Image: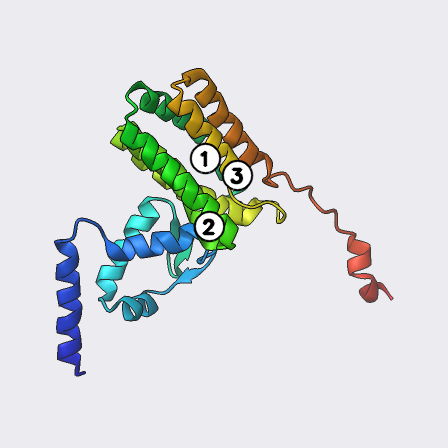
């Protein structure tokens, strides 16, 4: 393929994106981060991504800018784009925000819950259980997070749902950095209990379950690491001999 043909192909791919309802490259990169296939700190080279997706670097920069706006990646001057590595304080802030938003979304959903909503939630929990049974850890992580974004979407407040989607992606990065190695994603039984409370239209119980669920996730994080005191004399003992 000559240069002009390749450039024309890239322009065609870019133009196709402009008419798409969603950015497919953004969705693929978002999913890779959400499933922990791209861990925190991973470098996202423009040239390599442009080659993988068959688009121009300018097109990749648009996607990276959107991911950076969502605080899922970091754009560092003179270094490039990297999957974000949230600090312990940022992790605390995210969970504090989720504790404020998600019970409100649950209450809003219960206020106008429809049979189709319950069917979607139950089907999602079944997919979570199936993924766990098959040992598909990438799917488990993705579905666990998507349960929360589904709740946000069904609640009917697009602004809160968008904020929650962003925070769920950040939570994936937080868990990848600070989670106990012996604990996995959200427990499916907690999601199942929450759906049952929503179906019963028990707002108080459902909101309490959501708060307990979020606290359970945060409690498994190691955000308070004791500082290690370094014995300088031992470090430089050879220089003193």
Q: Which quadrant of the figure contains the C terminus?
A: bottom right
Q: Position of residue 146 (x, y in %)?
A: 38, 42
Q: Is 172 positioned to the left or the right of 70 in the image?
A: right
Query: Disc 1 and disc 2: Cα gap in Å?
Result: 27 Å
Q: Which quadrant of the figure contains the N terminus?
A: bottom left
Q: Position of residue 68 (x, y in %)?
A: 34, 49
Q: Position of residue 4 (x, y in %)?
A: 13, 78
Q: Can the viewer see residue 203?
A: yes
In the rendered image, which residue does mark 1 sit on?
A: 94
Name the one closer to the observer, 76 or 84.
84
The residue carrying pointer 1 sits among few (fewer than 14), some (14 to 19) or many (20 or more) residues within 10 Å by Cα, namely: many
Sequence order check, earlier mark of 3 and 1:
1
Q: Is 51 positioned to the left or the right of 139 in the image?
A: left
In front: mark 1 or mark 2? 2
Secondary element type, mark 3: loop
Sequence order check, earlier mark of 1 and 2:
1
In the rendered image, which residue does mark 2 sit on?
A: 131
- Residue at 51 percent of width and 35 percent of height: 189
């Amino acid at each position: 393929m000559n240069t002009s043909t390749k450039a024309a192909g890239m322009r065609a791919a870019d133009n196709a994106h402009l008419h798409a309802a969603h950015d497919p490259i953004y969705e693929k990169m978002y999913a890779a981060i959400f499933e922990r296939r791209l861990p925190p700190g991973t470098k996202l080279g423009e040239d390599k991504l442009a080659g993988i997706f068959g688009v121009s670097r300018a097109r990749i920069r648009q996607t990276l800018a959107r991911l950076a706006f969502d605080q899922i990646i970091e754009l560092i001057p003179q270094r490039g784009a990297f999957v974000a590595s949230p600090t312990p304080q940022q992790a605390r802030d995210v969970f504090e925000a989720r504790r404020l938003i998600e019970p409100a979304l649950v209450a809003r959903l219960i206020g106008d819950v429809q049979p189709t909503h319950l069917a979607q939630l139950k089907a999602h929990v079944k997919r979570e259980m199936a993924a766990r049974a098959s040992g598909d850890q990438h799917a488990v992580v993705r579905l666990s997070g998507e349960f929360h974004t589904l709740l946000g979407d069904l609640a009917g407040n697009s602004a809160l749902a968008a904020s929650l989607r962003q925070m769920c992606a950040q939570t994936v990065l937080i868990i990848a950095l600070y989670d106990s190695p012996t604990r996995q994603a959200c427990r499916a039984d907690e999601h199942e209990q929450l759906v049952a409370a929503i179906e019963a239209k028990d707002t108080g119980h459902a909101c309490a379950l959501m708060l307990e669920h979020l606290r359970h996730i945060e409690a498994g994080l190691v955000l308070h690491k004791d500082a290690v005191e370094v014995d300088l004399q031992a470090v430089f003992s050879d220089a003193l001999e």
